[in-house]
Structure formats: structure tokens, C-alpha cells
């Protein structure tokens, strides 16, 4: 829970708006469920493609009495990123250990609202893995990097995301932008 709360602090310090939030690859609910519990005024979408994770998240949301403001979605981010109900909506998105940087950036950019913030957990001691030109092509910029209390990158949507993103399922992993 400490890691999740640290990511939340980084998001708030970067100007992230916890009103409408997305946790990509929610798995066991970290950080999404923890932050949903901590931020009573927030609404969350927990997105994962693993059906076992989705079943767990659904039970956790019900058990924590969060069903009014936390939605669990089973699906591929490439498809959800093209859905008008999700594209360009989230003021804050979080992601932990989902994929390499180029892939995560392509997944998150279409989901962020203008000026939205994405906080991406990074492996400890990671070297520069964010390409400025690649991010710019997605409408993103690297706002900050943190090493303490957790390693994380903060991205911000600063321009419109080209319609071609996200690409079809699996393409970002097969042919990353950088």
C-alpha cells in the first residue's frame, strides 16, 4: 500500500486531478483500489485483460463498498483507447509494470484528457527509457521523474493524440515507437 500511496502523492504533486482516474493493468488493485479508498471524491476505472484479475477486482470493489464510484472493465487497452466512452476522458492514469515505456505511453495517451497526467511506476534504478520525440508523437511530454520514495515517470498530455493511436491489439508490443 505504501507504493500505491507514493504514486498517488507523485500524481497530486504533478497536478494530477483525482476526479476521474484510470488504473491500467489493475491486477491486484494496486494502486487503483488503494487510491480509490484514499481519495473519497475520485471515480475510478480499473482496467485489466486478465479475467481472474477482473473477478478479484469486482469482489474487492463490492467488499469495500466502492461500487458507486469504481468501475471494473475487462478488456484490451488498445480497444478501450478507441472507445468514445474512455478516449480522452481521464485526468489521471496510473500504470505499474505493464509493458516497456514506449508501449505504456501508446496505451495511456489516448485515454488521457487534455493536460491529463499519467504516473508510470518504473523499475528501481532504471535508466532513461522515455524518448522525447516518441512521446511528442503521442501528444505527451515527460513532466518529471522520481526515484524516491518510488521510481516513477510523470507524463502529461500536451497535444492532441493522433487518431491512429492506439494501434491494433499487439502492434505496440511488436513494433514499439522507440
Image (spheres, helix red, strand yellow):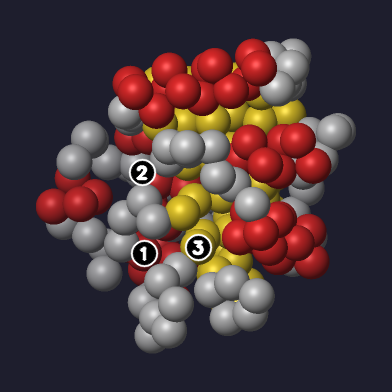
Q: Residue at x 75, y 62 (%)?
A: 9
Q: Position of residue 61 (x, y in %)?
A: 63, 21
Q: Nearer the viewer, mark 1 or mark 2?
A: 1
Q: Residue at x 41, y 71 (%)?
A: 123
Q: Residue at x 66, y 17 (%)?
A: 63
Q: Quadrant of residue 4?
A: bottom right
Which residue is under mark 1?
Answer: 101
Could you say which disc has been placed on residue 165 in the image?
Answer: 2
Q: Nearer the viewer, mark 1 or mark 3?
A: 3
Q: Position of residue 96 (x, y in %)?
A: 46, 54
- Secondary structure beneath disc 2? loop
- Secondary structure beneath disc 3? strand
Between marks 1 and 2, how big is the CA–CA gap?
15 Å
- Residue 5, placed above or below residue 36: below
Q: Quadrant of residue 167?
A: top left
Q: How many marks?
A: 3
- Residue 106, placed above or below residue 70: below
Q: Nearer the viewer, residue 33 or 95?
A: 33
Between marks 1 and 3, how big is the CA–CA gap?
10 Å
Which residue is under mark 3?
Answer: 121
Q: Quadrant of residue 78?
A: top left
In the image, farthest residue toward the left: 174
Amino acid at each position: 500500500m505504501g507504493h500505491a500511496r507514493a504514486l498517488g502523492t507523485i500524481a497530486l504533486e504533478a497536478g494530477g486531478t483525482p476526479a476521474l482516474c484510470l488504473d491500467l493493468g489493475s491486477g491486484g488493485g494496486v494502486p487503483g483500489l488503494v487510491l480509490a479508498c484514499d481519495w473519497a471524491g475520485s471515480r475510478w476505472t480499473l482496467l485489466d485483460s486478465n479475467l481472474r484479475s477482473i473477478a478479484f477486482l469486482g469482489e474487492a470493489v463490492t467488499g469495500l463498498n466502492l461500487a458507486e464510484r469504481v468501475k471494473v472493465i475487462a478488456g484490451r487497452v488498445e480497444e478501450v483507447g478507441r472507445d468514445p466512452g474512455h478516449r480522452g476522458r481521464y485526468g489521471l492514469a496510473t500504470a505499474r509494470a505493464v509493458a516497456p515505456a514506449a508501449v505504456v505511453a501508446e496505451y495511456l495517451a489516448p485515454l488521457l484528457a487534455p493536460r491529463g497526467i499519467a504516473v508510470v511506476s518504473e523499475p528501481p534504478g532504471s535508466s532513461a527509457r522515455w524518448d522525447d520525440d516518441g512521446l511528442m508523437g503521442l501528444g505527451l511530454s515527460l513532466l518529471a521523474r522520481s526515484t524516491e520514495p518510488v521510481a516513477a515517470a510523470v507524463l502529461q498530455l500536451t497535444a492532441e493524440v493522433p487518431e491512429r493511436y492506439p494501434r491494433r491489439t499487439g502492434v505496440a508490443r511488436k513494433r514499439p515507437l522507440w
